[in-house]
Structures are given as structure tokens and as C-alpha cells.
Image: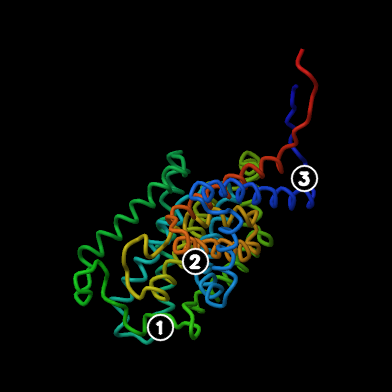
Amino acid sequence: MLFKIEKRVQAPATIKIAVLLISLAAGFCFASVIFLVKGVHPVYALSKIVSGSFGSLYGLKETVTKAIPLMLTGVGLTIAYRGKFWNIGAEGQLLFGAIAATWIALKCGANMPSYAVIPLMFGVGFVGGALWGIIPAIMKTRLRINEVITTLMFNYIAAEFVQFLVYGPWKGKSQWGFPYTDNFPPAATLSLIPSTRIHYVTLIIALAVIAIAYFIIMKTNFGYEIRVIGDNPDAGKYAGISFTRTTVVIMVLSGGFAGLAGVGEVAGVHHHLTYPWTISSGYGFTSIIVAWLAKLNPIYVIVSSFFLGGILIGGDTIQTSFGLPYATVNIFNGLILLFLIMGDFFLEYRVRLAGRRR
């Protein structure tokens, strides 16, 4: 048999929903193999994940805590991916935001009131993440270096730099030899909702950033330029849109929003700079799934962040319940992303039977 692949003009909404649900179901089915290998019934394992994250007040509170950095990094990636800039570096951009905020906290936190130092930390954290995002943007626009490679490599540079700081010049004198900085002064820490770890200031910022990102993409000339460059770079060139300027601004926003997530983690959760994998339990990588699951719509990022936050919390549950390694969650997330990307193929193209081979 011969198959013919045709590009769709526009997939109907029903097809989009069906493909999304089928992609998620396929990801869950393939992930079930991991549980079967460990002798755990897949349905029971999935029920444990759901109950651990959404089935109790504690699970819901922890899910929201995880969703906050995912919202900020995820909305940044929706902007980058809309412009077909494949930013894989949100993890490193988050870490540089955390580094910048830590510097302000340690230098100014003891001498400034909270209402001054907290905005300063978020502002400098945005700049730190943005600067770490601008470099790959310039390398692509000026040197034509693939951004997937540069942004991915920059994650590892950022992680190593954090370790250099906490083992070296920023190692805290009051931390009993552990590789942490000194704890932030009280003025440089974020208030929490009582009986939770939810730093509500960052949550409010995340929701505001999502609203701003939606407005930028859908209602402004710059958002139109992003969409044109993403859909047809040649058309953007002939329309007089500067590819270099647009790409750099895209990465200022994408990296800056990830930097805000880093500020929230060090100021709201940890209160010091520590191991990179403790500051971010893979938020920058998980946010790729967040953006893709949201179909690059900033508003939908709220829902997909909550969903993926629940998966992360559910991963802790299956660790304790079944003795599965935490890497199980990464495999689970990777399979979901794989099938989401495969599903997008069927949204872009239609496969038809063209006839029989003679």
C-alpha cells in the first residue's frame, strides 16, 4: 500500500482535542511497561500518582508549589517556541536567576527593608536569566549556531557555576561545612501561605506574567512578528521584520521569565543557594512538556503546569510506595513529550491511502 502525506490547512478543534487525549493515553500506556517490569500493576501505580498529588490537601499544596516555577519557565518557552527558537536552556536560565537573586540577598538583604530588596531580587533575577538567554540568541543570529546545542550546553555550564559558588567563594560560614551559602536575611525571603510552602508573591507574579505573555503574543505588533517568524521566516524577512532583533527580544523574555522562577525557588523555598539539582528538580526540562501540552498558549500553561506539578509530586509517592527510582518520573515525562510531538505531526499533516504498490 502507498500512503500520501498532505499538509492540513487547519485541524478542527475536535481533532486537536482527540489527538491530545490519544497522545497522553499512549504515553501512559508505554509508561505502564516500567511498572509491569517492577511487578506493579500499572493502574494501581497511576492511582497512587493521582492520589499522592491531587487526592489530599497536602498533595494539592505541594502540587501548587511545584507548579509555580513550571508556569514561569513554561510561559517563557511558549514565547520562544512560537518564534521557532528551540530553547532547551530554561534550566540554566532559572539557575542564573537564582544566582543573581542570591547575590542581592547576601549583599543587600541585611541592610534593606523587604519591600525594597524583594523587588530588587526579582528584577536582577530577570536580568540574570535574560542575559543567559541572550547569548545563544546572538550565537544563532550572528554565527548560525544551532540553538538546541548552545542552550542545552549552557544548562551544564550554569549548573557547574552554581557548584563552584557554593563549594567556593559563597560557601556559608554558618552551614557546618555543607555546600550552601549562608541563609538569606529575613527581609530577603518570601512569605508563605500558612501551613504550606506556597510563596504567594511568586505565584502572583507567575499569573501576571502569563497574562502579559498572552497579551504580547495575541494583541501586539511584536507578537505578530513572533508568529510570522515562527510560521514563515522568509515572509518575515520580506515584510521587513528584523530576525535578529525579534530573536534577541524573544530570548530576553524567555530567559528572564525562567530567571524569575529561580528567584522564587531560592527566596521562597530554600532561603539559600545550594546544589543546582536541589534548586531545580528539572523544572527547566519539564517546562518543555508544559509548553507543548499547552499548545504554546500562555493561558493553557496554568493547567499544564498544575498537571505536570502533580506528576512530580506523584513521583515522590511511587518512590516511597514501590521503591521505584525517581528516574521513573523522568521516563514518564519523556514518553509524554514524545507522544505529544508525534501527535502534533498528525495535526499538521493528514495521512491518506493513495493506492496499492504495483
| Amino acid tagged 1 | Ala
Comparing labels 3 and 2, the label whose residue is closer to the camera:
2
Distance from the alpha carbon under mark 1 to that under mark 2:
22 Å
Above/below status of 306 relative to 282: below
| Amino acid tagged 3 | Gln
The disc at residue 178 is none
The disc at residue 10 is 3
Question: Which of the two labelled residues, at mark 3 and mark 1, occupies the earlier sequence position?
Answer: 3
The residue singled out by tag 1 in the image is: 116
The colour scheme used here is rainbow
Front residue of 317/220: it is 317
The residue singled out by tag 2 in the image is: 69
Question: Which of the two labelled residues, at mark 1 and mark 2, occupies the earlier sequence position?
Answer: 2
| Amino acid tagged 2 | Pro
| 27 left or right of 286 in image | right
Count of numbered circles on the image = 3
